[in-house]
Image (cartoon, grey):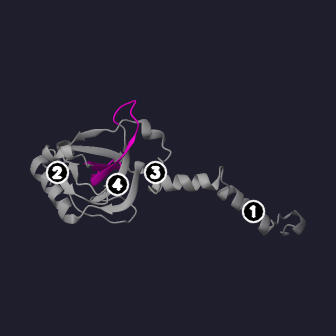
Amino acid sequence: MNPMPESSTTYTNPVRLFSRFLDRHFHHRGHLDEGIDELHANLGLSDRAPLDREDNQITVTVPTSSMNRPVIYAPDMDGQVDPGEVVWFRVVKGRDAEPELRACLIVGRNEHHTLLGMLISSNPEHRAESNWVPIGTGLWDPKGNKCWVRVDKIVEIPEARIQRRGVFMPERRYDRIAAELRNRHGWS
């Protein structure tokens, strides 16, 4: 069997091959500044909202008792959001309402890859309400106000819709919230 003559074998110029690779995998449509702005918005490094087609969906809350499960404190910056971490997400209260960026304490996740969170508020009116537990001040409120976490409702949040800022609830405060979940809502 004769090998194929060199004239019929296709030799590709390595520079041309590399150029095609770069064009195919790294050619961006749009401006670099727009991409960097979007990245900053997704990371929570700017006040601008990230582009998200799901921002119009009304935020759904469910009674805490219906989501009972073991509650643990396990914050870790390993890539996934863990119980004890504070994240921000856009809450939509009604069909015509503008999304509002809110802090939320993560207490678990369900099998649908959504996070289970509890809203954090600095509204002083919650001081007298039994469904809000005081958590004090922390990085979850940029003004340094005293805050409360709502324990009677759980918010289900798709992990793709959150902003992480590396903020954790101190363990003793989280334990106090976990005790409320165990005593009042049947969590274990």
Residue at x 21% of width, y 57% of height:
136
Measured Cα–Cα span from mark 3 to mark 1: 37 Å
| Magenta span main SS | strand
82 left or right of 70?
right
Quickly name the residue at label 4.
87
- Quarter of the image with the C terminus is bottom left
Measured Cα–Cα span from mark 2 to mark 1: 59 Å
SS class of the residue under badge 2? strand
Spot occupied by residue 130 in the image (x, y as percentages of width and height): 12, 45
Quickly name the residue at label 1.
19
Spot occupied by residue 101 in the image (x, y as percentages of width and height): 38, 46
As displayed, is residue 48 above or below residue 1? above
- Mark 2 vs 4, N-terminal side: 4
- Mark 1 vs 4, N-terminal side: 1
Give the magenta-colored segment's residue range: 93-120
Q: Residues within 10 Å of mark 2 (few under 14, many from 20)?
A: many
Mark 2 or mark 3, which is nearer to you? 3
Q: Mark 4 is on which residue type?
A: Val
Quickly name the residue at label 3.
47
Q: Residues within 10 Å of mark 1 (few under 14, many from 20)?
A: few
Contact, mark 4 vs mark 3 (Cβ under 8 Å): no
- Mark 4 vs 3, N-terminal side: 3
Q: Mark 1 is on which residue type?
A: Ser
Q: Is residue 72 magenta?
A: no
Measured Cα–Cα span from mark 2 to mark 4: 18 Å
Give residue 133's mark.
2
- Mark 3 vs 1, N-terminal side: 1
Spot occupied by residue 125 in the image (x, y as percentages of width and height): 19, 43
Res 70 visible:
no
